[in-house]
Amino acid sequence: MIRLLKPFLFLTTACVAVPALAQQSAPTQNWPANRPPAQAQAAPPAQQAPKPATPPAAPAAPGQQAAPATPPPIPLPQWFVDIDVNKKGEVTRAEFLKYRMKSFEELDINKDGKLSEEEFLKVVEPPHTPNAPNLPPLEERKTRARAEFQNLDTNRDGFVERPEAEAVVHSEFNNYDTDRDNKVTEPEVRLIIQRSLQREAAERQQAEARRRQGLMTLNEFMDMQLRSGEQLDKNNDGKVSQQEYLVMAGPADGAQAKNLPPFEMRKQIALRKFQEIDTNKDGQLDPVELTAYALKQFLEIDLNKDRFLSEDEFKKAQETEGAKVRAMLQAMQPPPQAAQPRPAPARGPQPAPQPTTPSGLAPGLPQGTR
């Protein structure tokens, strides 16, 4: 049973793409900007005021240490540079809303004030998302965009209406407007970005410390599972076919199949798992489907929700998966045959009744001996 259990665990985990805070984009990214997230950068040199010439620093006195160099300021995100064209050092709520909603207006082809899923998915295609060397495949980007569409469609009517998109933009603005004056200033933006970078650095340190303690991070777990999936891809086409996946059912016969359930039962269980992962029902498991299914399983295995998997959590996941497999095997067993009542023996001629002993006399004793 352990041999049957392990294959189903390897395909039950994967990773989420967590937006890198180093990109210095807005904390709320559910609504796409009118350009893909990019590394925050300072204004181009042509937009920056010329810096006055800096006089050469005086040499330090003997025995006196030179003052530490002042760290460079946190760069402003590109959206701030694009909006603050007049270099006022601030962005109003109205300016921010107009800038962020450009994507909505460009995607709303029929100008009905709402986006269908088909219109929304165009956000991951050029020109909204220009091609880049390290960009994920188009189908993977569409899968993520579909999930984002569901998050934005709060009233579940199948459309992202303008008020729904604007609500996310206002929430994003509030993350920067710390003094609630409906303006975001350069110091506020730099402070939020600095805190985000510090939080990201702390999370990296925590992840490294957990890894040294024997815990598995989300990315490590995903990599392990996807490597196992690559081993099934015998023709190296980047996908796992149903026939390739059936290897997980184990051997059909021979010594290795001696203590396993019947092969047909194991095959049915493997096919059920394949169909569960194959969400687009094309008979192939691609990296996007394996990743999505892996994420689902990672979240289920991570019982304490600390974004790490411990040995105990792995063990409990194995026990849970084993119970599911046993239940499926039991359901496949044919129902037991009902016991048939045994026929009564044929009644032959009854023997003649024996003469009864007279009342009051012990059997076998002659009369008069009492």
Image (cartoon, rainbow, N blue to C red):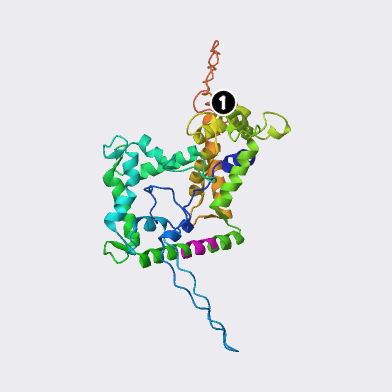
Q: Is residue 42 visible?
A: no
Q: Nearer the viewer, residue 351 or 168?
A: 168
Q: Amino acid at mark 1?
A: Gln
In the rendered image, the vertical position of residue 17 relative to residue 127, given as above or below: below
In the rendered image, the vertical position of residue 235 relative to residue 221, given as above or below: above
Q: Nearer the viewer, residue 193 or 86?
A: 86
> What residue sits 55% from the left and 82% below the top?
66
Task: Name the quadrant containing residue 143.
Answer: top left
Query: What kind of element bears circle 1?
Result: loop
Q: Quadrant of the C terminus?
A: top right
Task: Name the quadrant containing residue 96.
Answer: bottom left
> What residue sits 29% from the left and 49% below the top?
166
Dominant secondary structure, magenta: helix
Residue 222 in the image, given as x and y percentages of width and height: 56, 47
Where does the magenta region start and end? 198-204
Residue 7 is covered by the magenta coloring: no
Q: Quadrant of the N terminus?
A: top right
Q: Nearer the viewer, residue 363 or 171?
A: 171
Q: Is residue 219 visible?
A: yes
Write down the residue under mark 1. 367
Residue 199 is covered by the magenta coloring: yes
Q: Nearer the viewer, residue 93 or 55?
A: 55
> What residue sits 47% from the left and 41% below the top?
141
